[in-house]
């Protein structure tokens, strides 16, 4: 154990010294003001309500019964408890969703309302099985009036195989609708011809709108290293003294 500790210190000193001689800046602590953005699953922290939804392609949106404000179809997405189950935080339980016939283009799904407008980074869909894939169409908007506009279509085809499928959102959201595409599922599931879904969990994750471009790591020894200022070194473990030395480079590889 003592040998490992001394070796670790020596390696740390060696790396720091190499970077110092090479003119590469380095830091031993994280920078920032202590207010680092923390992404959260908004379906757990900011969900105001959730609703049955049926998408009618010929109407480019949902169709409600004006008399009672409900849907003409009986509950389909939630017939087996998928509406609550899709956002209960449990990845160990699945819920069957029975869609229309394999020739119908009407889509069964759910519409989720947040309590405010949030910038969302991604939607995570846990659904389907490896041999019975679920396929979803997703709409997201900051307004219910524009939820089914063409620009609100986030993805037309999110394929789920029982693990997790991530859909990029990257927009302001208050309303999001998630529909099973039964026709696409029958075409995808060539052996089983399955058109019904198996919902496990949906997660809508917030993001930092002002974060800018995603940081891309790079090997600074390849992009920033000044070879003229790079030297072998000798470190005295007892005193911590560092001096230039060529022994490290005696066997210079061709």
Image: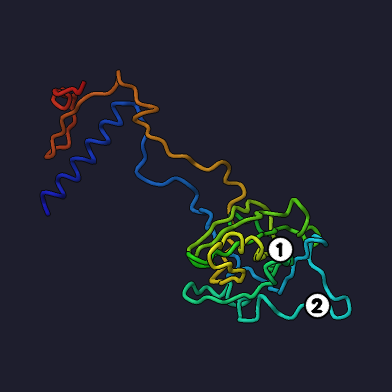
Q: Residue furthest right?
A: 67
Q: Residue at label 1? A: 175
Task: Tell whether 157 sits left or right of 17.
Answer: right
Of labels 1 and 2, earlier in sequence is: 2
Cα distance, mark 1 to mark 2? 22 Å
The quadrant of the image that shows the C terminus is top left
Q: Residue at label 2? A: 72
Label ID, residue 160: none
Task: Tell whether 30 sits left or right of 3.
Answer: right
The residue at 58%/55% (across/down) is 167
Q: Quadrant of residue 97?
A: bottom right
Residue placed most toward the observer, 240 or 244: 244
Crowding around mark 1 (Cα neighbors within 10 Å: few <14, some 14 to 19, many 20+) is many
Q: How is the image coloured?
A: rainbow
Dot 1: element:
strand
Residue placed most toward the observer, 42 or 232: 42
The residue at 59%/57% (across/down) is 158
Residue 74 place in picture, x, y as percent: 74, 81
In the depicted structure, whether residue 52 falls above or below residue 28: below
Viewer-side label of 1, 2: 2
Q: Is residue 179 something one can see in this rendering?
A: yes
In the depicted structure, whether residue 32 falls above or below residue 103: above
The residue at 21%/40% (across/down) is 11
Q: Quadrant of residue 96?
A: bottom right
Residue 71 place in picture, x, y as percent: 79, 76
The residue at 14%/46% (across/down) is 6
Q: Is residue 115 something one can see in this rendering?
A: no
In the depicted structure, whether residue 171 falls above or below residue 196: above
- Marks 2 and 1: in contact by CB < 8 Å? no
Residue 93 place in picture, x, y as percent: 50, 77
Dot 2: element:
loop
């Amino acid at each position: 154990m003592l040998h490992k500790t001394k070796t670790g210190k020596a390696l740390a000193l060696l790396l720091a010294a190499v970077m110092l001689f090479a003119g590469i800046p380095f830091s031993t602590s994280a920078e920032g003001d202590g207010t680092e953005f923390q992404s959260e699953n908004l379906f757990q922290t900011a969900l105001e309500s959730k609703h049955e939804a049926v998408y009618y392609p010929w109407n480019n949106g949902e169709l409600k019964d004006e008399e009672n404000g409900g849907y003409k179809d009986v509950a389909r997405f939630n017939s087996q408890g998928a509406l609550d189950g899709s956002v209960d935080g449990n990845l160990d339980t699945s819920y069957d969703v029975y869609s229309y016939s394999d020739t119908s283009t009407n889509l069964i799904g759910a519409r989720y309302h947040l309590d405010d407008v949030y910038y969302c980074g991604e939607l995570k869909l846990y659904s389907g099985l490896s041999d019975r894939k679920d396929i979803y169409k997703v709409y997201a908007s900051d307004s219910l009036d524009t939820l089914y506009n063409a620009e609100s279509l986030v993805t037309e085809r999110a394929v789920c195989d029982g693990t997790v499928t991530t859909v990029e959102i990257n927009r302001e959201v208050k309303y999001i609708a998630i529909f099973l595409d039964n026709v696409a599922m029958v075409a995808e599931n060539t052996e089983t011809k399955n058109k019904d879904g198996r919902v496990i969990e949906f997660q809508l994750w917030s993001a930092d709108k002002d974060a800018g471009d995603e940081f891309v790591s790079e090997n600074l020894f390849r992009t920033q290293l000044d070879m003229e200022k790079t030297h072998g070194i000798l470190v005295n473990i007892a005193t911590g003294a560092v001096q230039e030395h060529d022994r490290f480079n005696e066997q210079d590889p061709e």
